[in-house]
Each structure stands twice: as C-alpha cells, then as structure tokens.
Amino acid sequence: MVGIRIISGGGIAAVLKRLALILILSFVFGLSSIATKAWGQKGVIKIATQSPLSGEQAALGEHIKLGAQLAAEEAVKTFKALGFNLVFVPYDDQAKPEVGVANARNIAADPDILLIVGHFNSGVALPSSEIYKDTMLAMISPANTATEITDRGYPNVNRVCGRDDVQGPIGAGFAAQDLKVKSVYIVHDKTLYGQGVADAFRDEAAKFGLKILGYDGTEERANFGPMIIPMKAKNPDLVYFGGIYHQGGLFLKQMREKGVKAIYMGPDGMDSSEMVKIAGRQVIGSYYTTVAGPMDAYPESAAFAKRFKQRFGKETESFGIYGYDAALVGLKAIEHMIQSLGGKKPTRTQVSAAIRKLKNFKGITGTITFDEKGDTVKAKYFVLKFEKMHYPG
C-alpha cells in the first residue's frame, strides 16, 4: 500500500489548493523564462561582429573586429547612463560562407544583439545577411563591396564602404588614363567579390579601348605557374587580380619570379600590410584600388590611431577605421532610439529604421548618410601604390 502523507492545516482540500498554486506558479515562472528568452535581458544590449579571425584572411578581419570593439568600449559609459550594459561579442566567420551562416543563426537567436558589424568577405556576407533579414537585425558592413549586398534593398542591411561597380571602373580608368596601358590580363579568385570587381574592371577597361588579352578564374593557393606561363606569352601591359591579398600577394611574387614585367593592380582585397610579408620586394611598384583610404586621408584619423594603439598595442590599418565607423553609427542609432522611447530597449526593427534616419553622422571616415538601399551617400575611393616595401594604407 502506498503511504499518503496528510498535511495538517486544511486536509485534502488544502493540499489540492496548494498543488494548484504550485502548478500556477510553475506555469507563470515558465512563461517568464520564455519571455526573457524571447525579449532578452532588460538591461543588456549587445553588438556583434563577424569577420575572419583565423585562417589566411585573419589580418584584415582582426582590424575590423578591433575597430568595432574600440567603438563599443568607448560607448559603454553612455549606455550605462541610459540604464544598459553594453556587451561586445565577436564571431570568427573564417572567411567561409557556411561558418558565417552558422554564426548568423546564433547571433539572430540572441535577442540582446541589436547590431551586427560585418563581414569582410562579400561571399560570406550575402548568405549571412539573409539570416539577419529574417529577424530585422541591423547589419552595417565595413568592407563588403559586392553590388549584391545592397542591391537587394533590404531595410536592415547597410555599408559604410563603397561598391565594386565603382571601384572596378576607377581602377580601369586609372590604368588607361594615368598608367597609359594598352592591354590587360585579368585574373579573379572565383568568389562573389573577386569575380564581381574583376568583371567591373573588365567592362570599363573595354570602354577605354584597352585590349583584354585574357580573363581567368582560379581557386589556386600555392602554384600559379600553369596560369602565369601562358599569360607571360601574351605580354600584357597590366595584370589585374580580383581577389584577396593571401592569393594576390603570392600571385604577384610568382609572376615576377617567372619574369612577367607587367604592372600589377588589384582591388581593396590587397589593402593589407600582409602584401609586403607575402610578396616581399616584388610588391614594390604594384597598385591597388580601395574603398578605405590611408590614415592621412581622414582629418580625425590621428586621434583614432593613437587611441587604437594605446588600447591594442598595434598600428591600425584602414579597415580598422571602417570597423570603428560601422559600429559607431549603429551605436548612435541605438542610443537615439533609447532616448526616443523614454529609456526603453528598442526592437531590432526600430534600430534598423533609426540607422536609415541618421543624416550626416560624423564618423572618422567622414559624414555618413545611407540611401534607400543602404549604401553610404558619400563613399570614398582611392588608388594607392607600394612605392617601397611598406604598406601605404
């Protein structure tokens, strides 16, 4: 026989009432837990970054992350005064689309994250931003130049940098008008970014009457000889490589070692001090276009560079500034929304709308206003040259 303990003070009726109360309280606390998970912690706001922090492209990815981190750390006191703890959460997308998407799902699932600064690679940003769109999480890119990023017209996707359909033509125009070349050979890395900017360069080069001697795509990482040998035979005036420095620097080095004398040019994927480390002396005389200028291109950069070095113990590179500005403009929009809501925590949709409403926001890179697609109205473009074994950015 199972023993039943009778609790004194009311008998069975009282026991049933207490059991009912326990069930009700359990249900209420369960709802409370679900609500907390759905709406996040009342006094916490997070911003996240996604960029390559490991692998071949970690050098640029780290600068994006550190720039955004500095902006977040400098905003902590402001958010504290508004009643919120500001938390910075970096993610390593490894320059791989599948990793970026997996990270994006985790980011989107954290209701306290109101802003994502990222990515470096357009091929990672494009699928990841589809995840952000589903929850209207505001994304501000410091580096994604592929036209597709903003041409979709998503109300939560923005960038503080320029576009490849401008960057590519600028490179072609410089090659034709300033370098006076007559023929070009174009190579790209088969990525959304690399092929996109190479296509834009090719189309504009043709308009200038330049002879296109070749157009090849490669995923090679070590031995470019089979591509360089036939390229050398065509004797181009200029070789354009649409891709990132870890490939582009090695391609340049092997190109020179095999006796190719052509001028070398690439897009902003070459905008890294790693080009010097990879190509060595062969980097001298090469050119690259970029959407992120050198420090002296921005009046406010000296003070930023000083703070950056004091905090992280290293010199900043150009995409560090853009990581900072991307975070800064997003944080300012969140701040404005908190104030307009009387101190309440804004939703992701409200933050996305607030970012688009900011006009002539003063960042390190200049004034920032986003158009209806999320492009910055006053994007900057530069052509830089490695005059010596020193990074010019």
Image (tube, rainbow, N blue to C red):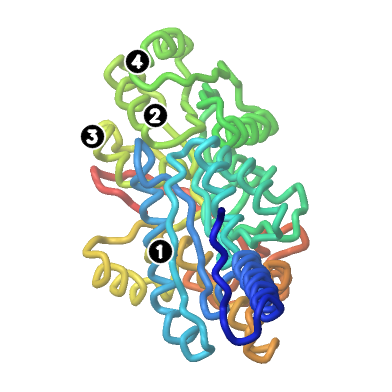
Whole-angstrom CA distance, mark 2 to mark 4, is 10 Å
Q: Quadrant of residue 38?
A: bottom right
Q: Amino acid at mark 1?
A: Gly
Callout 4 crowding tier (Cα within 10 Å): few <14, some 14–19, many ≥20: few
Whole-angstrom CA distance, mark 4 to mark 1, is 34 Å
Q: Is residue 145 or residue 335 the one in the foreground?
A: 335
Q: Quadrant of residue 201?
A: top right
Mark 4 highlights which residue? 223
Q: Which mark is nearer the camera, 2 or 3?
A: 2
Callout 1 crowding tier (Cα within 10 Å): few <14, some 14–19, many ≥20: many
Q: Amino acid at mark 3?
A: Gly
Mark 2 highlights which residue? 247
Q: Amino acid at mark 4?
A: Asn
Residue 327 location (% of width, % of height)? 51, 67
Whole-angstrom CA distance, mark 2 to mark 3, is 14 Å
Mark 1 highlights which residue? 67
Residue 79 location (% of width, % of height)? 49, 83
- Which of marks 2 and 1 precedes in the sequence? 1
Q: Amino acid at mark 2?
A: Gln
Residue 263 location (% of width, % of height)? 41, 30
Residue shown at 54%/23% (left/top)?
183
- Which of marks 3 and 4 precedes in the sequence? 4
Callout 3 crowding tier (Cα within 10 Å): few <14, some 14–19, many ≥20: some
Above or below 385: residue 180? above
Q: Is residue 15 or residue 207 the one in the foreground?
A: 15
Is label 2 in a helix, a strand or a loop? helix
Q: Which mark is nearer the camera, 1 or 2?
A: 1
Whole-angstrom CA distance, mark 1 to mark 2, is 25 Å
Q: Which mark is nearer the camera, 4 or 3?
A: 4
- Which of marks 3 and 2 precedes in the sequence? 2
- Which of marks 1 and 4 precedes in the sequence? 1
